[in-house]
Image (tube, helix red, strand yellow):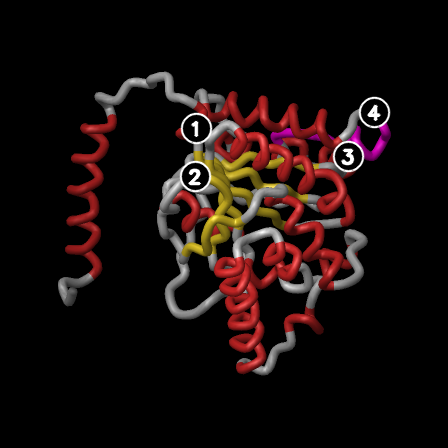
Amino acid sequence: MGQGTLKAIEQGARIAIDMLVEASELKREKAPIDKLMIAVNCGASDATSGIVANPATGYVCDKLINLGGTAIFNETAEIMGAEHILARRSSPEVGKRLLEIVKEVEDYVLSLGIDIRGNQPKPDNIEGGLTTVEEKALGNIAKAGSHPIQAIISYAEKPAGKGLYHMYSSPAGAESNTGFFACGAQITIFTTGKGNPVGHILGPVIKVTGNHRTVSTAPENIDLDISAVLKGQMDIEEAGEDLFSFLLQVASGKITKSEALKHNEFAISRIGLTV
């Protein structure tokens, strides 16, 4: 505190050098799949997100949890309208807390003179075919699969055990990913309908879409195209299996498009909740 910008940068550089030397000695080792912790997020959602990419991601969460792994989802403000569904499938204590934090977010935003329910979906979501806050929320929670929520964790808080967790945090992509990687997640699966290039400096971000138009216009930003679901050429389970296979490849060292393009976006929650 009080040492100024240049001394802070110098101290950080010294720490980074030590970490780099230590990291150079690390070797890739085999690990059981139950050690895998993933996070799921979405951005620039459209009508295909809720019926293709998000359910396929939910399938991956369920499969990983069945194998002993851990999955985390967030976007507290954007589950509004479907929070009662998540609460019903969790313990009374967790369900109550989930309903409380959604109300906390809404009350906080109302105190700023903004009505979330009147401002969602966002213009780009509406352009992509979403019509109501409830429709967006139903598509959103599909990413989390069907397991009960074990606990509500705070921003960057490490989960206490295995299973599904909700992180009480912002829906903003870079900010969300910082919290995910800080809490121990190794990979983020990021669904997008209209296309979103965000990556992160701390870990790989897998981009998956169910919108063929997005794949054709921005192929360099999409890791997995599962738009064949809309064409009737595959079902959600098959799409989920493809995504799970891709997830394991990334966990084994395959780089994602955002890594190749050096999308190293980074942000943290500092002053108040970003909604």
At label 3, counting other C-alpha atoms closer than 10 Å, the crowd grade (few under 14, some 14-19, many 20 or more) is some
Residue 200 x, y percent position in the rendering: 45, 42
Q: Reply above or below: 90 against 40.
A: below
Residue at the spot of label 3: 212
Mark 1 in CB contact with mark 2 (< 8 angstroms) = yes
Residue at image mark 4: 233
Which of discs 3 and 4 lies nearer the camera? The answer is 4
Up the image or down, 71 lies above or below 27; here it is: below
Q: Which numbered disc flags the more N-terminal residue, 1 or 2? A: 1
Q: Can see residue 212?
A: yes
- Give the mark toward the camera: 4 or 2: 2
Label 1 vs label 4: CA separation? 31 Å
Q: Are marks 2 and 3 in contact (CB under 8 Å)?
A: no
Q: Is residue 45 left or right of residue 67?
A: right
Which badge, 2 or 3, comes first in the chain's sequence? 2
SS label for mark 4: loop
Read off the residue under disc 1.
34
Distance from Cα at disc 4 to Cα at disc 2:
34 Å
Q: Which residue is mark 2?
A: 162
